[in-house]
Image: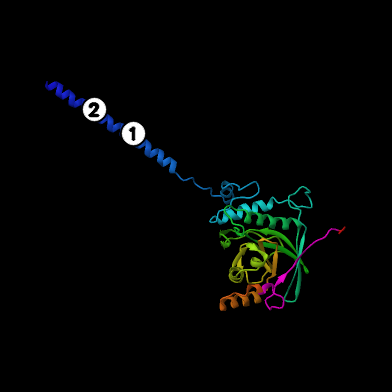
Amino acid sequence: MRRVRIGGRASQWGRALLVCALYAIGLGAAILALSQNRRTPVPSVHALDRARERGMIDDLVPRLDPQDAFANAAILNAILEEVPHPGLHSDAACQARARIIAVQLSGTLSRVRFSGRQVCQLKRLKEVSTRQEGLGRDEVAEVAAFLLGKRLGNDVDVTRVLVPPFRFSGDTLDFLAADLGPLAPGEQLIGSYHTHPGDELNQGVLSETDLAYMVSGQVELDGHGRSLNESGPRTDWLLDIVDPKRGDWNAYAHDRKRLLELLGRCGQNAACPLNELRLGGSEFNLYVRFYEEQSDEE
């Protein structure tokens, strides 16, 4: 009888230990599985790789990240490089003609020329801006670019369209301080381009935020930083282009003095008189038209 009781107790303890061991093993396996499932993928350290990992909205439009400024710049500059020259590729999707904008500043006339390829590059940026996911009819994911060029007398040829690192929230941009790289001999920053929501009537002018950035913003080119509002060997800012979602280029001469005065006027009034930028007869009228080059036959 005693042996039976002792043996029964031993058997019960054995079963209890076995159950506890199996429970512990199962619990450990479950914890391990959960930890593996919850492990966050390590993002690539390379901006362009991060952008490519986000994939495409369709065959032509990369998916931008509102917070990854360097990845946005990397993917947009990469797709700009892929834009073919319409004059050399008859099957290219964009067959834009060269455009010329004449700007009169401080008594000096500058004829700024965009090649057909550069017009197509800006159209490409607009396409990416207006076709991001979740946008309404008038909404954009605002994108911007700097225009670089070379001067020969009164003629200024645009040489590059360069996208700086930027974050965005809807139609608001936030540029990050970064060296935009080396300049070619004689190359200067000559202007800016950015998209706007809406149509030309309501959104075809520079915003108060645009004016504030142009007056106080900083840019670093070729290892040298400077204020955007200063002239110098690397900066010859001539024009600013606003491209509304439903419209085409609205270009403005970059008159530093008048832009600063207009910004001051905005600070004094509840209603900022931005429409005077394109109002005939206004002291703040800086609107300039673009013209497309015609073929010899035309």
Residue range corresponding to the magenta coloring: 276-295
User: Residue 244 or 69: which is nearer the viewer?
Assistant: 244
User: Residue 140 or 232: which is nearer the viewer?
Assistant: 140
Q: Secondary structure at mark 2?
A: helix
Between the C-alphas of marks 2 and 1, the distance is 16 Å
| Residue sitting at x 55%, y 53% | 65
Q: Which residue is mark 2?
A: 14
Q: How many marks?
A: 2
The x and y percentages for residue 155 are 78, 66
| Residue sitting at x 39%, y 38% | 32
Task: State the predominant SS element of the stretch in magenta.
Answer: loop
Among all residues in the image, which is located at the extreme right?
297
Tag on residue 25? Answer: 1
Task: Let me know if residue 56 is in the magenta part.
Answer: no
Amino acid type shown at disc 2: Gly
Snapshot quadrant of residue 296:
bottom right
The x and y percentages for residue 261 are 62, 78
Mark 2 or mark 1: which comes first in sequence? 2
Amino acid type shown at disc 1: Ile
Q: Is residue 117 above or below residue 274?
A: above
User: Residue 254 or 123: which is nearer the viewer?
Assistant: 123
Tell me: 268 left or right of 107: left
Q: Residues within 10 Å of mark 1 (few under 14, many from 20)?
A: few
| Residue sitting at x 25%, y 30% | 17
Q: Is residue 261 above or below residue 205?
A: below
The x and y percentages for residue 190 are 69, 66
Snapshot quadrant of residue 180:
bottom right
Tell me: 22 left or right of 237: left
